[in-house]
Amino acid sequence: MSILSDWAAYLRKRQAPMADRSHTYRTRAVILRRRNHGDADRILTVFTPNLGKRLLIANGARKTTSRKAGHLELFNHASLLVARARAWDIITESVTVDSFLRLRTDLDSISRAAYICELVDAFTAEDDDNQSLWSLLLLCLRELNTDSAVGDLLLRWFELHLLSLMGFQPQLFHCLGCGGDLQPVTNYLHLHAGGVYCPRCGETLPDTEPIMPEALKVLRHLTRTPWRKIRALQLRQSTERAIASILHRYLVYVLERRLKSADFLNRLRLAPAADSRISQSK
Ligand SMILES: [Zn+2]
């Protein structure tokens, strides 16, 4: 046998098991969204650490006898075995890693988790892996699951860090016009330009709005501080409202479409009593 045919045999031997393995893959995943398909199936939108966002099909997941179904609830962190297929890859096994129980029972936590998952969905394309975003998503879901006192501040912190990971971090430290350090005075926000102008550059510019020093200070603090140091922060209601409005409008601008979950949150705030009655009667 020639060296070449030895080599060819060696390669065949190496490639055979690899080819088998490539039919399936195992991945961790968070279930971002799911919809019914056919009589008994579900199409799931999941986010994974190494494969980014994926659309997967869970055959028979809506049958009461399905062993997979319980592991594929919304917001679940699951370990999946997936078979490659032409249309959607097929979930063949699923095991729950963390079921986030509070995210099934507490309406405020559910709506916040839905908002976070919708933003991750909206900002990502299929197969764009982003390990930092995976870590951010898990951190937020765990926090919502364990801390009942966690409020909308987590959402604001998440929004800023998501924007930064996706390359849309607003400029909050230097004037967009002259580049000078922004001072603790009333500066001028320009949402479409993605940041803040100093008074000298911003005052006469069209489409700017004043931003109070307190709101800018909080936005800057959220941007550069890990969550564990933010958790205990107490904000004045007016500041909280101001930064919520700024971030919401900036996100809407960036995504160029209304966010369904944000509307959902607003509806909840307007009618808390009615919504909790609905959830109790379910
Ligand atoms: Zn300036």
Image: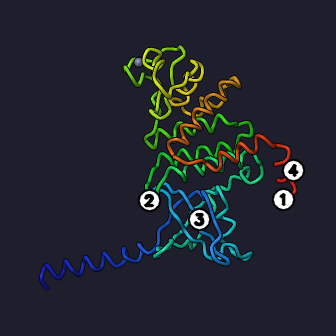
The earlier-in-sequence mark between 4 and 3 is 3
The earlier-in-sequence mark between 4 and 2 is 2
For discs 4 and 3, the disc positioned in front in the rendered view: 4
The earlier-in-sequence mark between 3 and 1 is 3
Mark 1 crowd level (few <14, some 14–19, many ≥20, 10 Å Cα): few
The earlier-in-sequence mark between 4 and 1 is 4
Q: Which mark is residue 163?
A: none
Q: State the CA–CA distance, disc 3 to disc 1.
A: 23 Å
The residue indicated by pointer 4 is 277
Residue at the spot x=45%, y=39% of the render?
Answer: 168
Q: Quadrant of ligand 1?
A: top left
The residue indicated by pointer 2 is 127
Asked if the residues shown at circle 4 and circle 1 are in contact, with their CB atoms under 8 angstroms apart, the answer is no
Asked if the residues shown at circle 3 and circle 2 are in contact, with their CB atoms under 8 angstroms apart, the answer is no
Q: State the CA–CA distance, disc 4 to disc 1.
A: 9 Å
The residue indicated by pointer 3 is 44
Residue at the spot x=14%, y=79% of the render?
Answer: 4
The residue indicated by pointer 1 is 282
Give, as a three-letter code, the residue at label 1: Lys
Helix, strand or loop for disc 3: strand
Up/down of 49 relative to 83, above or below: above
- Specify the quadrant of the image occupied by residue 232: top right
Give, as a three-letter code, the residue at label 4: Arg
Residue at the spot x=54%, y=33% of the render?
Answer: 226
Residue 206 at x, y percent in the picture = 47, 26
Give, as a three-letter code, the residue at label 2: Asp
Helix, strand or loop for disc 2: loop
Residue 6 at x, y percent in the picture = 18, 80
Q: State the CA–CA distance, disc 4 to disc 3.
A: 29 Å
Mark 3 crowd level (few <14, some 14–19, many ≥20, 10 Å Cα): many
The earlier-in-sequence mark between 2 and 1 is 2
Up/down of 15 relative to 112, above or below: below
